[in-house]
Image (cartoon, rainbow, N blue to C red):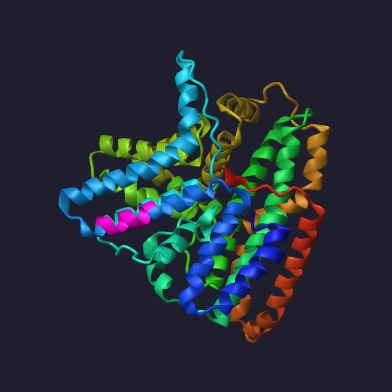
Amino acid sequence: MVFSSIPFLYYFLPVVLICYFLVPFRLKNLILLIFSLLFYSWGEPRYVFLMVISIFLAYGEGIFLEKAQGKKAAGVLAAACCVHIGLLLYFKYADFFIENMNALGLELPLLKVALPIGISFYTFQILSYLVDVYRKDCKAQKNLVSFGAYVSMFPQLIAGPIVRYSDIERQLVYRKHTLSGAALGIRRFVLGLAKKVIFANNLGKLCSIFQESSDLSVLYYWLYAIAFCLQIYFDFSGYSDMAIGLGRIFGFDFPENFDHPYISRSIREFWRRWHMTLGSWFRDYVYIPMGGNRVKRSRWFLNIGVVWCLTGLWHGASWNFVVWGLMFAVLLMVEKAGFSRLLERSRIFSHIYVLLMVMISFVVFNAADLGESLEYLKVMFTGGGLPFISQECSYYLKSYETILFWAVIGATPGPRQLVEAFRKRKAGEKILQILEPLFLAGVLIIITGFLVNDSYNPFLYFRF
């Protein structure tokens, strides 16, 4: 079940909200846990048991870690991490390793294990919890229901943001439910839903049309690259907005995950704005423990290479993702070596540089394999013997020019800044209090029309 679906919007969510707000506070976490497991089992009935097992294991491990001291605690942490990472490796990477072993001459049978949805996200949440308990940054959760609600909470279960236990530790015990908080949550959810349904889905159609086309041209490849960059941004940031909005309705403050990354002037800045909870997770649990940047330059290069190789692999079991991650590692190394000083001299050049590098990286990211990504880049930068523009490219460029224009505008802080500027004007706040609910209701009606009449509703980050 995805948020951008009729069953979720008009059946599942209303039932959850009614049950949640009818029960006393002591039962609210239980309601969240029950409905989160139902939400997960809707699409993955077999693997809900895997999640339940992971919850029980991590719950016991956390309590044991809190009591253990010294080397014993370190041993418990190592064993616990091996268990959860082992489950992730088996379900997500087993066939990838076997395929690469077979490429070396072996003939091992593939396991053909289905990937449990959201396993990368909830595994990272469990790992951060265990490490934080070991470090004494937080206390182990003694209430199994509350801990289960933390791991399985459906608003952020499928695609984040990656919520650390310390982010909501107090809110699991006590949280306020206010009309103003719920209103802000609804607003955030509807705007995220609009990102997904109006922008990401339509841009996804354009990408699919290109991939199935036989009337290709150089400009068509560039159009595809631009469309996919916008699609993945609106798809993923839209889902994050919906998750944050739902969390707010239930009284939780989830961390932000996107901050208009396409306005960045360096790759370093881009990754401070894109999937921020993943970046901060690798920083705090991999990069800094390896020494961070307080090491010799050669060791720093190694640290960056390891972190970005893992970041790529986190996204999927494919060499495309490894290369994608290592591309960013190299770019960060180049910026560290002095290129960042050049970027500071020209705002225009730095923006073009970031957009071009990110676009190239996402061509690699979305290709079926490395060979296809190289073919795409060859055409984009050398022409590959294709015409500059084709009849089909011209047609779809014209057909999608409006959605592309507004997508570019929507990927900047401009719309939000205009609203905030209007809010500060005399009577601006009162006018917005009247217009905003009407606007959101209208957007929801339009979205419902899209969902009823259109079966094209993919979600890119389900595969991670």
Q: How many marks?
A: 0
**Which residue is at the front of the view, 378 or 276?**
276
- In the rendered image, residue 76, in percent from the top left (x then y), is placed at 25, 48
Which residue is rendered at x = 55% and y = 47% of the image? Answer: 117
Question: For this view, does 15 lie left or right of residue 285?
Answer: right
Which residue is rendered at x = 61% and y = 69% of the image? Answer: 16
Asked if the magenta segment contains residue 35, the reply would be: no
Q: Is residue 367 visible?
A: yes
Question: For this view, does 381 lie left or right of residue 171?
Answer: right
Give the quarter of the figure containing the N terminus. Answer: bottom right
Q: Main secondary structure of the magenta part?
A: helix
Q: Which residues are magenta?
A: 57-65
- In the rendered image, residue 31, in percent from the top left (x then y), is placed at 53, 69
Which quadrant of the figure has residue 67? bottom left
Which residue is rendered at x = 64% and y = 58% of the image? Answer: 3
* Residue 256 position (above or below residue 126): below
Asked if the magenta segment contains residue 64, the reply would be: yes
- In the rendered image, residue 382, in percent from the top left (x then y), is placed at 63, 25
Question: For this view, does 198 lie left or right of residue 413?
Answer: right
Which residue is rendered at x = 22% and y = 48% of the image? Answer: 74
Which quadrant of the figure has residue 186? bottom right
- In the rendered image, residue 438, in percent from the top left (x then y), is placed at 73, 76
* Residue 143 position (above or below residue 23): above
Q: Is residue 280 visible?
A: no
Q: Residue lying farthest left?
A: 70
